[in-house]
Image: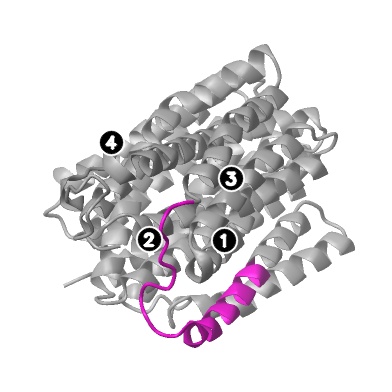
Amino acid sequence: MSDDVKDAAGGSAADEGLFSGRYASTSAVFTAVMFLTGMAALAVVPTLPTAARDLGGVALYPLVAGCFVAASLLGGVLGGHWADRSGAHRPLAAGMAASVLTLLIAGASPSVWQLAAGRFLEGLAGGMVAVSVNTAIGQVFPERLRPRALALMSACWIVPSLVGPPLAGLVAEWWSWRAVFFGLAALTALPAVAVAVVLRGRSWSPGRTGGPAGAEEAPRRPALRAAAALSLGAALGQYGVSGWDLRHLLFAVGGFGLLAVFAPRLLPPGTWRAARGLPATVLLCGLGSGVFFTVEAYVPLMLVAERDASAVAVGLAFTGAAVAWAAASWVQGRLLESRPRHTLVAAGAVVLAAAVATAAAGAHPAVPSLVAGAAMVVAAVGMGLLAPSLTVLSLFHSPGRQGYASSSMQITQNLGQVTVLGFASALFNAVSAAGAAGYGAALGVLLPLCALLAVLAVRTRGA
């Protein structure tokens, strides 16, 4: 879509903003979509420990927590593949419709298995929506408006990060965790309809990078198959570590075997041995994300199942973590911008280690539950230093291949989450009969990973 195109009134497209002229309705729809996507993503998570406890599935909680991430990997690849072929509006509309359906499925769960299935389908839909929105921005908006549109999409997550978790906690505490899912489904229904209606008449330009469609088809199919295998492997692995019998062992071996076979096909060569530059940067992204995600999974579960904390308190811990991450990210980008990026990665790893130690100490019954909740905030500070620095380094190491680097970072982030959570869950279920000791074991295994992060940070060094 050219910047030179004149609108129907005869004005120049260069005079239009995101919320004026031909782009107003599209911008409004995208804003609503991302706002509610952020609300659903951030509001549902604090209610999952309560739901798992009420459904008698605490042992399967890692599966419930991890299958969303596993499915989002496939959803992102599927959405991007579909958007390139026929325009981003179709996978976006399909993803929004699926989001409504999956929220209803999860909210109506009579067992933890249906809850896990609902979360898996939510991850599939969420991955499609996230990738489709970013692709749609490139297909609908002119180049001069794309940075503003991307900034707007990021801003749409600010309010959900502040009000979503505590509001969901209040609803779960005063009414039911099911009401959170049903309420979000009702709120998401209108934007889902708007996506189908408003974007139908837009001009789309799939495959805008040029080249015949058939030439691009071949490399996408292996990526799609590999992503499907990774999602399946992650889900099987999460189930496998939820028990200690032969059946669970076979599922775990099969699941993590799929990850070992197919992950290297989607990651830079040398990632597993932390080769200097992009491979080490990608690996550390996965390790850091895995540590933080495991803390974020087990601390709320511990607060609800062991300390009988309210859903409101858990929601406030998530809000505090979101604010802390944003503040630390701002500090590293403004006040510490002159510091070498690899030193900020190491500093973030040290802060993460302090958070893990705090969370493990908070598992002891004699320690106030506030300590464990505070660990989530401290961990977010570490990630606020570490994650943006790794992103900057990945772009530095891949001139002309930023898309490849971004995709690799996203993949290893998801893999790190499901893999680290899987190993922590195996330890948790091995000693869960001992009560608080199970949480201590699950969290304690993260400390060596934090040390590895700090040691390997120098291998991400830029010029």
Disc marking residue 396: none
Mark toward the start of the polypeptide (3 vs 1): 1
Mark-to-mark CA distance, 2 and 1: 22 Å
Badge 4 amino acid: Ala
Taking the image as shown, residue 457 lies to the left or right of residue 438, namely left
Image coordinates of residue 277 in percent, x first then y, are 30, 75
Residue designated by label 2: 139
Badge 2 amino acid: Gln
Q: Are marks 3 and 1 in contact (CB under 8 Å)?
A: no
Reply yes or no: does residue 77 show up in magenta. Answer: no
Mark-to-mark CA distance, 3 and 2: 18 Å
**Could you classify mark 3 by the number of other residues whose Cα lies within 10 Å: few (under 14), some (14-19), or many (20 or more)?**
many
Mark toward the start of the polypeptide (4 vs 3): 3
- Mark 3 falls on what kind of element? helix
* Residue nearest the observer in this picture, 144 or 231: 144
Which of discs 4 and 3 lies nearer the camera? The answer is 3
* Residue nearest the observer in this picture, 122 or 245: 122
* Residue nearest the observer in this picture, 439 or 259: 259
Reply yes or no: does residue 218 show up in magenta. Answer: yes
Taking the image as shown, residue 16 lies to the left or right of residue 359, namely left
Mark toward the start of the polypeptide (4 vs 1): 1
Mark toward the start of the polypeptide (2 vs 1): 1
Badge 3 amino acid: Met
- Magenta highlight range: 201-230
Mark-to-mark CA distance, 4 and 3: 31 Å
**Could you classify mark 1 by the number of other residues whose Cα lies within 10 Å: few (under 14), some (14-19), or many (20 or more)?**
many
- The residue at 21%/45% (across/down) is 16
Residue designated by label 1: 73
Residue designated by label 4: 327
